[in-house]
Amino acid sequence: MAQLKPVDEALSEILAHAKPISGEIIELTQASNRTLAEPVVALTSQPPFNGSAMDGYALKASDGTKGTVLKNIGVAAAGTPFDRPLANGECARIYTGGELPQGADSVIMQEKVTIEGDQITLQDDVADGQNVRLKGNDFAKDQTIARAGKCLNPFDISLIAAAGHGQIKVTRKPKLHILATGDELVQPGQPLEQGQIYASNGFGLTPLFELAGVTVQDFGVAIDEQAKLEAKLQAALQDEPDILVTTGGASVGDKDYMLAALQAIGAEIDFWRIAVRPGKPLMFGRLGKTLIFGLPGNPVSALVTATVFVRPAIAALSGQAADPKIVQLPLADQLPKNGPRQFYRRARLTTYKSGLAVDPILEMDSAHLSSLSQCDGFIVQAPFCEGKQTGASVDFMMLPWAL
Ligand SMILES: Nc1nc2c(c(=O)[nH]1)N[C@H]1C(S)=C(S)[C@@H](COP(=O)(O)OP(=O)(O)OC[C@H]3O[C@@H](n4cnc5c(N)ncnc54)[C@H](O)[C@@H]3O)O[C@H]1N2
Ligand code: MOO
């Protein structure tokens, strides 16, 4: 058998073909989890004026000595500025978010004054600039506030709104099609006959990919006949998705037609079989602009390889830096040594000596879904690496929903 391709080599080859796709303008309300196609530059300074951080009185710091009596000459409310400049010995009532009147440079909280008619007496000293948010202290007009390639989270979206943008340019959402294979597969909800199992892969892969920011269409199940598989593949490729993901038929059994069927319809296969566990028979190829991932049928293999190989490709197509989110954490238990393939070993987050740690799950079967469902991520073990003792540090690929 040909040498298995190392994981890093396979990933670099995949990423070399996953170039960022075109951009489109969208409403900011639709921006969650979308990736910026260009930097966002502030249309205004934030705050746009010198404003108060407290409900109280705007004054000149030169008048701000404890015991001073000031005359209150008006109100500066948020949205309704006070239009007269303050003279020495004067103050203005101001609310949080109100613009400082001209001449004022400081604010005293209302709890720190006593009031009598239109006069206030300061109960504390006031420093220059106290309780004032200076214009542009958050960001300045024309400042870049978010970089191209940033996948937008809710906090980013508020920032962009505060900078005045109702629309932004993001990369188009990649389109991803899924096709399963296997005579034995039955949709959940249907009765199961002898020898059949439920088709579970598409159900996990769809949200896994959607969380990564693509639009998914599931083309169902192809039966194990090469001509029928070719027809199904052609249907799934017809409107040129950015990615096609198949599961099953990737190994060497007489009914494993995926490689032959992909070649027969004209796909160029870049590689088949990787030194990865689980997921050895993974194939990667291309047809036109579509990247094709032939994942193994075993459910754990399919979901792990989708995480390790397909998600970075989605990130790259979306214009993001591929970021596998690997962190170093101590082991909460012993870790057995590894064999010849890079192992993505199921593991749970836990605590060890009152810090965050990972607990390896010993189940290794690539069809065992309940252990996969219990894991928070994968300990990444290089080929042939030695076992490790409790407390030793390991590389951990955290799943997006882990914490
Ligand atoms: N002689 C060898 N046999 C196998 C090798 C090998 O190197 N030599 N590799 C093994 C490895 S590793 C894997 S992984 C599997 C992958 O096989 P296939 O990709 O051909 O997958 P299938 O045979 O189609 O299915 C395997 C298993 O998974 C179930 N399955 C398939 N699709 C689904 C689905 N959509 N939902 C749920 N379950 C699914 C299927 O019923 C089988 O039980 O090959 C090993 N064999
Ligand atoms: O690679 Mo297979 O997924 O080990 O069973």
Image (cartoon, rainbow, N blue to C red):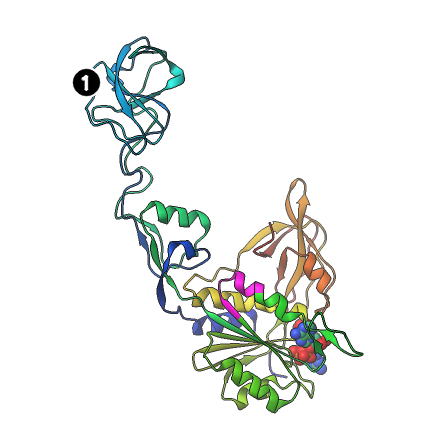
Q: Is residue 123 visible?
A: yes
Query: Which residue sits at x=73%, y=73%?
Result: 190
Between 280 and 290, the residue placed more toward the observer is: 290
Indicate whether 71 appears above or below 192.
above
Between 401 and 278, the residue placed more toward the observer is: 401
Query: Which residue sits at x=69%, y=88%?
Result: 254
Local crowd size for mark 1, using a 10 Å CA cut-off: few (<14), some (14–19), many (≥20):
some
Indicate whether 24 appears above or below 252.
above
Question: To which quarter of the image does residue 113 belong?
Answer: top left
Q: Position of residue 42 (x, y in %)?
A: 29, 48
Report how many numbered discs are placed on residues in the image: 1
Secondary structure beneath dot 1 equals loop
Q: Which residues are magenta?
A: 207-216
Q: What's the amino acid at mark 1?
A: Ala
Q: Position of residue 213 (x, y in %)?
A: 49, 62
**Magenta span contains residue 373:** no
Query: Which residue sits at x=52%, y=83%?
Result: 235
Taking the image in four quarters, ligand 2 sits in the one at bottom right
Residue hosting label 1: 87
In-image side of 316 versus 385 (left or right): left
Q: Is residue 278 visible?
A: no
Q: Quadrant of the N terminus?
A: bottom right
Query: Which residue sits at x=77%, y=75%?
Result: 192
Indicate whether 357 appears above or below 209.
above
**Magenta span contains residue 212:** yes
Q: Position of residue 253 (x, y in %)?
A: 69, 85
Between 22 and 382, the residue placed more toward the observer is: 22
Indicate whether 181 appears above or below 100.
below
Q: Position of residue 52 (x, y in %)?
A: 33, 28
